[in-house]
Amino acid sequence: MLKGFFADWPKHPDEETHLELLKNSYQIVLAIDEQIQQVVGFITAISDGVLSAYIPLLEVLPEYQNQGIGSELIRRMLAELDGIYMIDLMCDRELQPYYSKQGLHLATGMVHRNYAAQTGTVKHQ
């Protein structure tokens, strides 16, 4: 049910890890192709439930892209997070125009990436 995601990732989470990250998210929104009963897109948020939320993942299967699914997932997630003061999202530079069209604003930020843990299977102590 969760096959084909993270297509552009050099190392991606396996299906078990994918299920775990969905389960542990503050909020998730799924896009399902009802004809084949398959998840074709998802968006996740982590939050303190008071002031801040972060959207770490928006994924749509490659064959379902450019059909408005990602935009609808963002719209629904922002509606779910209505009332939260700050909703942050980090993206690659080439995706900034896409997210601007969704109502997000360009901001500066800093990140740390542990690429050895990119698959999600390296557990922290």
Image (cartoon, rainbow, N blue to C red):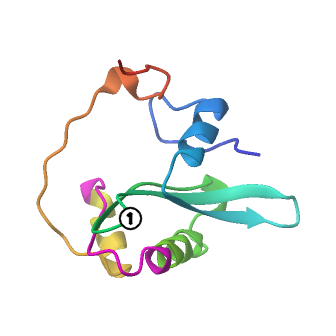
Residue 60: x, y in percent? Answer: 58, 58
Residue 122: x, y in percent? Answer: 44, 19
- Please report the residue visible at 70 percent of the width from the left and 44 percent of the height from the top: 2
- Please report the residue visible at 20 percent of the width from the left and 36 percent of the height from the top: 112
- Seen in the picture, residue 61 relative to 124 is either above or below; the reply is below
Query: Which residue corresponds to mark 1?
Result: 49
Residue 51: x, y in percent? Answer: 27, 68
Where is residue 62, by image quadrant? Answer: bottom right
Where is residue 40, by image quadrant? Answer: bottom right
Q: Residue furthest front?
A: 50
In the displayed structure image, the side of residue 24 where residue 15 appears, left or right: right
Range drawn in magenta: 78-93
- Seen in the picture, residue 89 relative to 125 is either above or below; the reply is below
Residue type at mark 1?
Gly
Residue 114: x, y in percent? Answer: 28, 27
Nearer-the-camera pick, 22 or 13: 22
Q: Is residue 110 magenta?
A: no
In the displayed structure image, the side of residue 107 where residue 11 appears, left or right: right
- Please report the residue visible at 38 percent of the width from the left and 79 percent of the height from the top: 102
- Seen in the picture, residue 84 relative to 113 is either above or below; the reply is below
Q: Residue furthest right?
A: 35
